[in-house]
Amino acid sequence: MPNAQTRASAKYNAKTYEEMKIRVYKGQKDQIAAHAASKGMSLNAYINALIAADMGEKLTKPEQEQGR
């Protein structure tokens, strides 16, 4: 059974984030992850940075994040 911290994290993540799935050819995930790591980023952070760079001001942050 998960401890209180695990449950709290799962509840926060479910409330705060959405997930989406992307498909790449076999072997590309490792290449992309290695490239992200070479930049000091996780795969998730790298993909989010690419999206933010492409969309710019069109990409809005949720209200709870804007106050940070």
Image: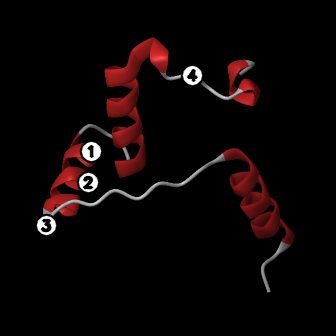
Q: Residue at horizontal 41%, vertical 16%?
A: 56
Mark closer to the chain start, 3 or 1: 3
Q: Which residue is mark 3?
A: 27
Residue 36, disc: 1
Marks 4/1: CA distance? 23 Å
Seen at 34% across and 56% down, the residue is 22
Give the residue type at disc 3: Gly
Q: Closer to the N terminus: mark 3 or mark 2?
A: 3
Q: 43 or 57: nearer the eye?
A: 57
- Tell me if 35 is positioned left or right of 50 in this view: left
Q: Is 54 located above or below residue 6 in the figure?
A: above
How many numbered callouts?
Answer: 4
Kind of residue sitting beneath label 2: Ala
In the image, what residue occupies the spot 35% across and 50% down?
43
Identity, as a three-letter code, of the amino acid under mark 4: Thr
Residue 30 position in % (x across, y down)? 20, 62
From the image, which quarter does the C terminus lie in?
A: top right
Look at the numbered discs 2 and 1 and tell me whether their residues touch, using CB distance below 8 Å. Answer: yes
Question: Which quarter of the figure is the N terminus placed in?
Answer: bottom right
Numbered label attached to residue 48: none
Which marked residue is nearer to the observer: mark 3 or mark 1? 3
For disc 4, the marked residue is 60
The answer to whether mark 4 and mark 1 are in CB contact below 8 A is no
Kindly state the secondary structure of the residue where label 3 is placed. Answer: loop
Determine whether the residue tagged by mark 1 lies in a helix, strand or loop: helix
Q: What element does badge 2 sit on?
A: helix
